[in-house]
Amino acid sequence: MIERVSTLPAIEDVESVTPSESVPVRSAPLSSRLRGLPKYLFLSVFALFSIFPLYFMAVSATNTSQDVLDSRMIPGLALFDNFAGLLDLQDVGSAMWNSATVAVGTTVLALIVCSIAGYGFEVFHSRAKDLLMAVLLIAIMIPFAATMIPLFQVFAEVGMINSLGAVIIPAISTPFLILLFRQASRSFPYEIIEAARIDGVSELGIFARIYLPSMRSTYAAAAVITFMTAWNNFLWPKVILVNNDFQTMPMLISNLSAGYVVDYGVLMLAVFLASVPTVIVFMVLQRSFAEGITGAIK
C-alpha cells in the first residue's frame, strides 16, 4: 500500500510567514527617481507662476490701496473697509445677480441648442451637411467685433436694448460648441440609435433617453467653457447694456477703474468676488471637463 506524502507545510510554518516576507517590496533605484526630478521641478515652478496671480489678488483684497501699489505680499487688515467701500461705490449684489442670470441662462440654452445641432450633424445624413459644417468652421474665424454693429441694430429694431436677453441670445449657438458635440458624437455607437428606431422610440426620445446620458462628460466640458465665457464677457454687455442697473461684474470692475483716483484695494476685492463663481464651477466639473475634452478630440 502506497503512502501519501503530504507536501503542505505545517500549520505553524504557515502562520510564521508574513505578507512582507512572501512578497518583498523593492524601492525604486535612486537614479530613476533623480531622472524625474527636473520634470517635477519644472512643473512646480510652472504651478507657482500660475497660482501667484490668484494669491496676489486675494492678498490685495485685504490691503489698502497704497499697500497694493507697494506690492505687499502678506494679508492686511483692510478687508472690511474695502468691502464697505465697494458697497458704497457700486451695487455688487445686482451685478452678481445679472452676471449669474446671463451665465446660467446662456449655459443652459447653449447646451440644449448646440448639442441638438451636433447630434444632428453626425446622426442625420444629408448632402448639405458637409457644406454647412464648412460654413460653421469659417464662422469660427470671424471676429465678434465684425458682427457687433449689425447685432446692435437688430436688437435696437426689436426694442431689446438694456435687456439681459440681448446678452444671452447671441451666445446661445456658437460654432465651437456645435463642433465639440459633433466630434463627441462620432464615438457614440450608431447601432444603438438604429435599434431604438426599430423599437419605435422617437428621435426626441433617443436624444433625451439614450444620447444625453452617455454624453455627460461632453456636457460638463461645454458647460464649463460656456459659463466662464458668459461670466467674463465684457465687450458685448458694455455695448448693449447702456443703463448701469443691468451692469455685470466685468462692467462693474471697469467702472471702478475708470475714475481719476482708483482704490486698488476695493478694485482687487471686486476682481476676487468676480472670480469665485468661475473657480467653483471649474473645480466641481474639473474631472468631467477633462474627460469631455479628451473624448471630443479623439
Image (cartoon, rainbow, N blue to C red):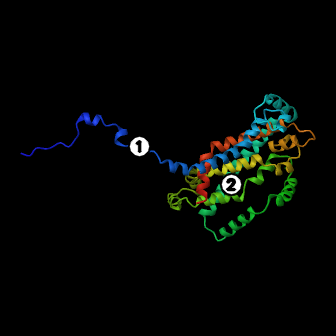
Q: Is residue 246 above or below residue 136?
A: above
Residue 183 occupies quadrant:
bottom right
| Mark identifier at residue 193 | none
Q: Is residue 49 left or right of residue 1?
A: right
Q: Is residue 207 left or right of residue 87?
A: left
Quadrant where the C terminus lies?
bottom right
Q: Is residue 17 above or below residue 130?
A: above
The residue that disc 2 covers is 113
Secondary structure type for disc 1: loop
Between discs 1 and 2, the one toward the N terminus: 1
Q: 10 Å neighbourhood of mark 1: few (<14), some, or many (≥20)?
A: few
Label 1–label 2 contact, CB within 8 A: no
Horizontal and vertical percent for residue 78?
A: 81, 29
Horizontal and vertical percent for residue 24?
A: 38, 43
Question: Which amino acid, by three-letter code, is at mark 1?
Answer: Val
The residue that disc 1 covers is 25
Q: Is residue 128 left or right of residue 141?
A: left
Residue 127 occupies quadrant:
bottom right
Q: What residue is shown at x 55% (from left), y 53% (from top)?
A: 210
Q: What residue is shown at x 89% (from left), y 39% (from top)?
A: 262
Query: Of 101 and 274, which appears nearest the observer?
Result: 274
Q: Is residue 199 above or below residue 256?
A: below
Mark 1 and mark 2: span between their CA atoms?
55 Å
Horizontal and vertical percent for residue 194?
A: 52, 61
